[in-house]
Image: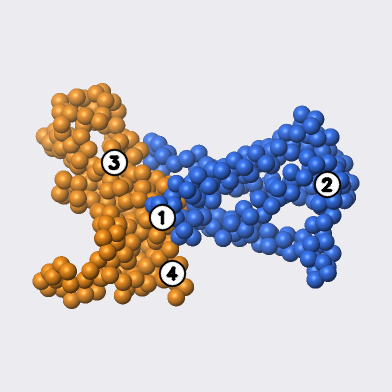
Chain colours: A orange, B blue
Amino acid sequence: MNLTLRIWRQAGPDDPGGFSTYRVGDISPDMSFLEMLDTLNETLALRGEEPVAFDHDCREGICGACGMVIDGQAHGPQPTTTCQLHMRHFEDGATVDVEPWRAAAFPVVKDLVVDRSALDRVIGAGGYITAPTGSAPEAHATPVPKEAADAAFEHAACIGCGACVAACPNGSAMLFTAAKVVHLNLLPQGAPERSSRVRGMVGAMDAEDFGGCTNTGECATACPKGIPLSAISALNREFLRGTLR
Amino acid sequence: MAATGAVMLLYLVAHMLGNLKIFFGPDDLNGYAAWLRTVGQPFLGHAWFLWIARVVLLASVVGHGVAAYQLSRRDLAARPQKYARRRARSSYATRTMRWGGVILALFIVWHILDLTTLTVNPRAEEGHPYQNVVASFSTWYGGGIYIVAMLAVGLHVRHGFWSAAQTLGVNNARRDRVLKATANVLALVLTAGFLAVPVAVMIGAVK
């Protein structure tokens, strides 16, 4: 396969940046999108040019690092992460636009790499359980209802990649915050901090440069882990409960 | 936005049902309009109920507009740089909420000048809403503005009702389909009910 790539190049946070066009040939349809970028970077390095900077780590769809917008869609045309996106989903000879996440809360560090630490600050405001750590507790020490365990697991699938923020026309982090709050607030281990968690995390989210939620649903459509849009309703329910009492 | 929207939605349902009295003739509609001024008597004075409703509605419209403005300012600031190519994956009703809201705000001003204060009404006969409505919808602009605004109401309610359920924390995975279906039915019934009046005047069924 041959592709024409229009990639956002930006030397640093203060550089205005712009698109550069590259032709990549000899692409196997079984390559992942990141492997295709690796091939491009090898040729760029051989030519003595600066390789395209992009975030990546596990390359198996669970770390959430490899965020980029491909043809206007977060993580590209498939509901998965960029590392798990295969080149067979692209037409031979197509022109593909590759951009970083665009959000005021995610400043561009370089090329396709953005600073997602705003999400970490939201987690730091309550996305955990204050409990003595140590060896794993006995599994039946705290009974968890099956329904709560299933729903908590569904929301715990969030990998914090930021696709929801990138896809949202308002650059809002509601789905991310909702997934984390709902995951912990459903479980008995999270119950003691239920109110302070939702107040703290929503407060931290509002303190960042994220936009507000208008329920467009683009976040859940883009989410590679299938976090349901109803999580946002559950977050609002928890927030009302947490602020009224 | 959800609370003020719910107040206005309840009012819209009552308003639409009241409008349909036009199909029972001038005496029915004019009598209904006169009765509205006597609601709550003798506890309330003449037209007090109407004024209470107007104050509540004005507060709702202003609150809704201010919240929408603040939210939009924040949302636009959160995406300072647009994507080169963007494929919207939300519904048409969702994407037109802001412009739909602006159209509706302008329409409310026109609607009050037309049928409440009668400033721009071609007949302007106080106490005779039937005759005023027929006169307004007999002009191309009166009917046209109304029809455009009612289509905007339908779209606004279609996203707004479900979105309010999300905001108030009422939605969950099981209720989602029911809430979306209710939003669609509400939007369709309101639009059809409101549009019935100008269409009837334009085809001569109501004179």
Give the distance between the C-alpha atoms of the residues marked 2 and 3, in whole angstroms: 57 Å
Q: Which residue is mark 3?
A: A79
Q: Quadrant of the N terminus of chain A?
A: top left
Q: Residue at x 10, y 71 (%)?
A: A135
Closer to the camera: disc 4 or disc 2? 2
What separation in Å lies between label 1 and label 4 (alpha carbons)? 16 Å
Image coordinates of residue B2 in percent, x first then y, are 54, 58
Instruction: State the CA–CA distance, disc 2 to disc 1.
Output: 43 Å
Is residue B112 shown left or right of residue A196? Answer: right
| Viewer-side label of 1, 3 | 1
Per the model, the C-alpha gap separating discs 1 and 3 is: 22 Å
**Amino acid of disc 3:** Pro
**Disc 2: CA contacts within 10 A as few (<14), some (14-19) or many (>=20):** some
The image shows residue A186, relative to residue A65, as above or below, that is below
Residue B156 locus on image (x, y percent):
57, 46
Q: Would you name the residue on which mark 2 appears?
A: B28
Chain letter of mark 4 equals A
Q: Are marks 2 and 3 on the same chain?
A: no
Amino acid type assigned to the residue bearing label 4 in the image? Arg
Mark 2 near mark 1, Cβ–Cβ under 8 Å? no
Task: Tell me the crowding category of disc 1: few under 14, some 14 to 19, or many 20 or more residues within 10 angstroms, Cα based.
Answer: some
